[in-house]
Amino acid sequence: TTDNVTFNQVTASSSVTAGGILKGVGFNQPISVKTANYTLTASDHTVVFNTASGNLTATLPAGVEGQIFVLRKSAYGISTNDLTITPNGSETIEGAASYTISACSGVAVTLQFLSGNWYIINMAFIGNPC
């Protein structure tokens, strides 16, 4: 379905696909914090991994064209523990079998899927840079 709303000559559109994915602007996305290894699902969007207690692994679900996830490594202070991101099956991240955020705290990566590969479309350093 598609909805259009007009406010003072500005039109915002959004639509929901058959798979239940909302597309458009001006909407909220789910966010969660994990302290253990976690496999993302299609309903996730932003996942913060607290690596204060040890290394963690974020496993991506099977990619859907255009799908976006934001993953952040945060130990609420400097941490020497890693966050390793692994794709599903034979999929890759920037052509590699996995991607690791090492040593730094407050690093976030935005990943988007296309044709068997997760692309890093943004990387942000929050707080203390590496």
Image: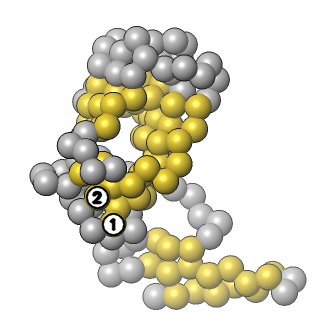
Whether residue 111 sits left or right of residue 2 in the image: it is: left
Whether residue 98 sits left or right of residue 30 in the image: it is: left
Tell me how far mark 1 sits from mark 2, CA to CA.
5 Å
Which secondary structure, mark 1?
strand
Q: Is residue 103 above or below residue 118?
A: above
- Residue 114's tag is 1
Image location (x, y in percent) of residue 39: 24, 42
Which secondary structure, mark 2?
strand
Residue under pointer 2: 117
Residue kind at label 1, given as amino acid type: Leu
Asked whether residue 111 is in view, the answer is yes
What residue is at 62 percent from the left and 82 percent from the top?
13
Image location (x, y in percent) of residue 55: 29, 19
Which residue is at the far left? Answer: 89
Question: Cβ–Cβ below 8 Å for labels 1 and 2?
Answer: yes
Q: Quadrant of the C terminus?
A: top right
Q: Is residue 13 above or below residue 98?
A: below
What residue is at 27 percent from the left and 68 percent from the top?
115
Label 1 packing within 10 angstroms: few (<14), some (14-19), many (20+): some
**Residue 11 sits in which quadrant?**
bottom right
